[in-house]
Image (cartoon, grey):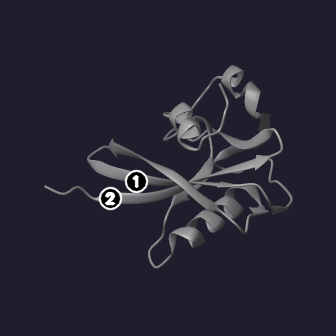
Amino acid sequence: MAKEIVLTVMGALVKGDSLLVQNRTKTDWPGLTLAGGKVEDKESIKEAIKREFLEETGLEVKDWHFENYIEWNIKGQRHLCLLFKAFEFKGTLIQATSEGANLWLKIKEIKDAGNFSDDFDKILDLLKIDWR
């Protein structure tokens, strides 16, 4: 029997030797992760990553590049998350939202930051971010 599929997106924004991460405080996905969220009805995947990232960080990214995907089965639903990466942006970073705090971390210091959300390490690997 086919399960409902929830389509989501996540974006890795890299600036030099740093990665923009979100320290989520929401109980459904707490810990360090990347900005992102669900693709809305009548919205393209590219529109969704631009919108979600802008809403959660205040930053506008023009050229997101699809890198990989990750999937989960959560409470009887299949979640498919498309992973994007970008290097250029404009705007002013929102320090915190209802999702959590946004912060730049040196990529090589991520392993010492701890408090990873579920599968954050796998997501970084799938995005080919050399964080170990």
Determine whether label 1 and label 2 are within 8 Å by CB.
yes
In the rendered image of this protein, does residue 101 appear above or below residue 64?
above
Q: Position of residue 106 (x, y in %)?
A: 79, 33
Which numbered tag is attached to residue 80?
A: 1
**x 62%, y 26%: residue:** 115
Relative to 128, 122 lies left or right: left
Secondary element under disc 1, as helix, strand or loop, is: strand
Marks 1 and 2 sit apart, C-alpha to C-alpha, by 7 Å
Q: Which residue bears the numbered disc 2?
A: 5
Q: At numbered mark 2, what does the secondary structure look like: helix, strand or loop?
A: strand
Seen at 65% across and 66% down, the residue is: 50
x, y (%) of residue 45? 51, 68
Q: Residue at the spot x=57%, y=69% of the render?
A: 46
Classify residue 20 by image quadrant.
Answer: top right
Residue 77: in sight, yes or no? yes
Residue 96 can be seen, yes or no: no
Q: Is 88 on the left-hand or right-hand side of 48?
A: right
Closest to the observer: 113 or 122?
122
Q: Residues within 10 Å of mark 1 (few under 14, many from 20)?
A: some
Residue extending furthest toward the left: 1
Query: Mark 2: few, some, or many residues within 10 Å (few <14, many ≥20)?
Result: some
- Residue 72: x %, y % from top left: 37, 43
Residue type at the position of mark 2: Ile
What's the amino acid at mark 1? Leu
Task: Tell me residue 99's x, y (percent).
Answer: 63, 48
Q: Nearer the viewer, residue 39 or 18?
A: 18
Query: Residue at (70%, 28%) from the top-left corner?
Result: 110
* Residue 75 appears left or right of 105: left
Which image quadrant: the N terminus?
A: bottom left
Question: Sequence-wise, which precedes: disc 1 or disc 2?
Answer: 2
